[in-house]
Amino acid sequence: MHRLTLAIVAAAMVAVARPAAATINVVTSIPDLADVTRHVGGDLVEVKSLATGVEDIHAVPMKPMYAVTLNRADILVVLGLEAEHAFIPGLLDAARNPKILPDAPGYINASVDIQPLEVPTRLDRSLGDQHPLGNPHYNLDPVRMKDAARAIADGLSRNYPENAATFKQNLDAYLATLDTAIARWMQEAAPLKGKKLVSYHPDMVYFAQRFGMEAVGIIELRAGVDPTPAHVEELEKMMKDQHVTFVIRELHYPAGLSETVAQVTGATLVQLPVMSGGLPQTQTYVDFIDYNLKTMLAALPQS
């Protein structure tokens, strides 16, 4: 029997075994992935996000209710690149749901086709341990999130092949929505081209690259390592020398030091969420990127 015929038979068997009207219970690690999954899955999915958007993705609290939510999940979607290292593994141990373990079909890693930035040349705990596979904050780049959407559609289709055509149709529609938004954003971002920024944590690297800015440093000593006075002093000197325009304070980090660095260097302080849902007006992924870009543009110093 040909391989294609076997695939058709397998899909038919799955369709018979699973009620057509059954809702697919999807859990995502962050709201960005939840919004994308809702677009791709359409009426076939019910989606919950563990994070709400206000947290540090590297330190989302491991609430007991999350283990219950994961126990009932058919699918788990993660950002990947070990972004969720501090909470997903422990919750999966507690959830006792073999369908969504990392080696199971129900575990969808949205980063499978992502080319990460800042991949370390060597691993050393003293260098910070939050980005061992490269910078995982690609959700701030809408072009890379198109790859994440494709990974989600592929994962849903792998688990529910009888609905693959629907997932593909929904994916194409959402990618068209993103393409329209990206074309508009690229035009709007023109005044930001060449501007330099420093952020508290390297969350903004992908956003800066996509919209023509340059991320030249972070307030942390290294990713996940608290700053030292000597590091801050060196950072401030570099910022003055390079005429850095922005200090980005990600909303889940303390305000005080970011404010001080901006004041000392003459840079403009901008406060941004790093996930959908980080502010009330950023509930969808498109709204999230739209808000961050417009906030950056509004903060440009007047010439």
Image (spheres, rainbow, N blue to C red):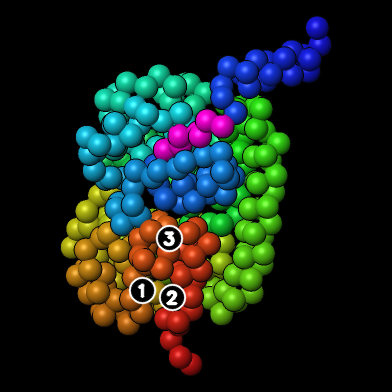
| Residues at discs 3 and 2 in contact (Cβ within 8 Å) | no
Please give the residue where the numbered disc 2 appears in the rendered image: 295
Q: For mark 1, what is the residue?
A: 270
Q: Residue at x 65, y 15 (%)?
A: 13
Q: Residue at x 33, y 63 (%)?
A: 250
Does the CB distance between marks 1 and 3 fall below 8 Å? no
Secondary structure of the magenta portion, mostly?
Answer: strand
Q: CA distance from mark 3 to mark 2?
A: 16 Å
Q: Identify the secondary structure beneath mark 1.
A: strand
In the image, farthest residue toward the bottom: 303
**Marks 1 and 3, the one that precedes in the sequence:** 1
Give how far apart the Cα atoms at labels 1 and 2 are. 8 Å
Q: Is residue 154 above or below residue 10?
A: below
Looking at the rendered structure, the secondary structure element under dot 2 is helix
Determine crowd level at label 2: few under 14, some 14-19, many 20+ residues with C-alpha closer than 10 A.
Answer: some
Which marked residue is nearer to the observer: mark 1 or mark 3?
3
Q: Secondary structure at mark 3?
A: loop
Q: Identify the disc placed on residue 25.
A: none
Residue type pointed to by label 2: Thr
Mark 3 burial class by Cα count in 10 Å: few <14, some 14-19, many 20+: some
Residue 78 in view here:
no
Q: Position of residue 257 (x, y in %)?
A: 21, 68
Mark 1 Cα shell of 10 Å, populated few (<14), some (14-19), many (≥20)? many
- Looking at the image, residue 211 lies above or below residue 277: below
Q: Amino acid at mark 1?
A: Val
Q: Look at 59% across and 76% down and name the residue there.
A: 188
Residue 50, located in which quarter of the rendered image?
A: top left
Quarter containing the N terminus: top right
Question: Label 2 near label 1: C-beta < 8 Å?
Answer: yes
Residue 29 falls left or right of residue 164: left
Tell me, for residue 283, which label it has, or none: 3
Over which residues does the magenta segment extend? 21-28
